Image: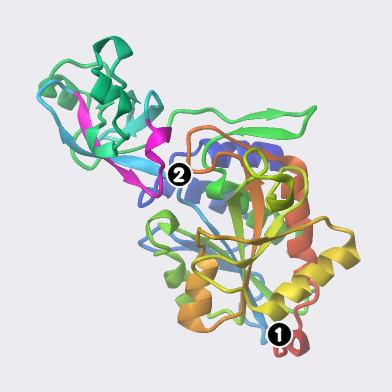
Amino acid sequence: MDRISRIVALSEAFGPSGFEDDAAAIVREELPDYETYTDHMTNVRCEKEPASDKPRVMLDAHLDEVGVIVQAIKPNGTMRFLPLGGWAATSFPTSSFRLRTKDGGFVKAVVASKPPHFMSAEEKNRPLDVANMVLDCGTSSKEETEALGLGVGCPGVPEINCDFDEERGLFYGKAFDDRIGAAAVIDILNQVRDEELPCNVMGSFSTQEEVGERGVLSNAEALKPDVMIAFEGCPADDTFSEEYMIQAGLRKGPMLRHFDVSMITNWRFQKLALDTAREAGIPVQEAVRSGGGTNGAMVNSRAGVPAIVISVPVRYIHSSNCFCTLEDYENAVKLGVEICRRLDWNTVNKL
């Protein structure tokens, strides 16, 4: 697939945390020149030069997306559910979901919202709570819902198609956290496949990031990186922040974070990335984040590996409706390639 079709396919793939098989299949198909390995968590990994003694550079992106999982079916056929990953309760009401049935089929459902006609004054002013919400697939009894193949443990994702506006270079869809990062890692691996690099570039497509960065540790243990670059879809802040506080705006380049609640970025590696961007004429944004966390933190803190995070800004992340741009994506890919061209042993040993 070309890069546009690949991003669209990855966005539309069904893959909430713990159920990333469809996204993993696309990754394997899009890396025909690599020998890939998939473990029992559905983590996918590969190496450019497995036998080399060059620095081992792990390019990571996570395959999972935020979703839901059915907790119980009520007598009236609606379903109690729990979030998979970090949702704001305000993102749920009236949102449509695609639920995977026990036999692998799909059923559409909506998060029920009581019409205002039936709400008391107290209900209208009550804070939203997922514990009070249900999924409705249009049935009227538990038996009818179960007959569709739905039950406890069935996962779901937003029911949204991915569209690309070619004139504006704008993607609309779901799961750009982190399928846009996965697309970037695929793109970089394919670009450098036949290029002589000073490092061994390794692909890590990890699972269950949204529920605690679980899968990346398996890939890190297997790949044993000397350095790591995490590619992410990060929350854009340009539609609700004051101008001076915007650190992840659309069309301003990928964002490199110095700090979030999970990691203080290795300043030497961060400086290398920023210097590389400046020398190559690649626009970037710098950020200090009061929230959030990435796979980079897990590998950095658990294995002592210097890591940076290159993020494509995504508006309205962790919701059903998101925007990101082709130019930010392309600049993230360019930056990743340029950094890999500089990571020889002399450079890595100074990080």
Q: Which residue is mark 1?
A: 348
Residue 290 in magenta? no
SS under mark 1: helix
Residue 269 in sight in this render: yes
Assess whether residue 89 is covered by the magenta stretch: yes
Task: Name the quadrant of the C terminus.
Answer: bottom right
Return the x and y of residue 312 as percentages of the image width and height.
66, 51
Q: Position of residue 58 (x, y in %)?
A: 60, 71
Give the numbered dot on residue 22: 2
Against 15, is 302 above or below? below
192 shown above or below 246: below
Q: CA distance from mark 2 to mark 1?
A: 35 Å
Mark 2 or mark 1: name the one nearer the start of the chain. 2
Look at label 1 and name its amino acid.
Answer: Val
- Numbered range of the magenta stretch: 78-92
Where residue 296 sits, quadrant-wise, is bottom right
* Quadrant of residue 264 within the rendered picture: bottom right
Instruction: Look at discs 2 and 1 and give the one toward the viewer.
Output: 1
Q: Could you tell me the amino acid type at mark 2? A: Asp
**Residue beneath the point at 78% across and 68% down:** 274
Q: Tell me if mark 2 has few (under 14), some (14-19) or many (20+) residues whose alpha carbon lies within 10 angstroms of its own.
A: some
Q: Position of residue 284 (x, y in %)?
A: 77, 57
Identify which residue is drawn at 76% across, 70% down: 273
Is residue 157 in view? no
Vertical order, 175 against 47 (above or below): above
Q: Which residue is found at the position 40% from the left and 25% from the top?
A: 96
